[in-house]
Amino acid sequence: MTYTARVRITVTAGNRTLIREGSGAGHGIDADKGLAHESALKEAETDATKRALMSFGNAFGLALYDKQQRQVSSAAATGSASAPAAATTAAAAAKTPPAEALNAPLPPAAITRLQERIKALAPARLEAFSKGFRAAFQVPDAQPSLAGLITTSRHQRWIEGFLASVTTT
């Protein structure tokens, strides 16, 4: 049996909506036709979901295709709350750590590394970063600098996702 699937993922953050789509195929071979259908359908759906999520960068799935997980860090190695993305469905891929882990303070070295990566952005990307960060964390425009606000694992996860999307677009 062979199935194809098309998945559309819609993410809304503030007044911005992103839509990503992915297509996938699945093949099922089994003496029991019902199991062959089920296997092919699941494989097609998983493949399409992974393809849609990978367009968001490592934060939402690009790392799913990297068997060596080169750009995925463990909490022990980085002191952050990010974990390897190994999910194969949209619900599992969007799973986040507990709130207390997301609110964990970042070590000063991690904050410095993030700030250096942000400073290296092209002006247009830096402006997009600023607008996105302000929207994601409800920072008023009256706040002149965002640098001092990067303090928790939640901020790190958002920034790494933004930076990953910049390198894939």
Image (tube, grey):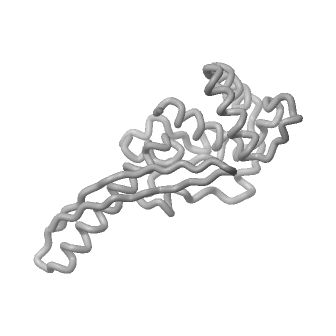
Report the residue at 43% width, 40% height from top. Answer: 69
- Residue 57 appears at what percent x and percent y? 49, 40
- Residue 81 appears at what percent x and percent y? 64, 47
Report the residue at 84% width, 41% height from top. Answer: 140
Front one among 88 and 81: 88
Considering only vertical position in the picture, is 155 above or below 167?
below
Question: Which image quadrant: the N terminus?
Answer: bottom left
Front one among 114 and 77: 114
- Residue 5 appears at what percent x and percent y? 30, 61
- Residue 68 appears at what percent x and percent y? 39, 39
Q: Residue furthest left?
A: 31
Quick check: 7 left or right of 135? left
Report the residue at 82% width, 42% height from top. Answer: 139
Front one among 117 and 81: 117
Quick check: 59 left or right of 78? left
Quick check: 101 left or right of 144? left
Q: Residue furthest right?
A: 142
Quick check: 131 left or right of 58? right
Report the residue at 33% width, 62% height from top. Answer: 45
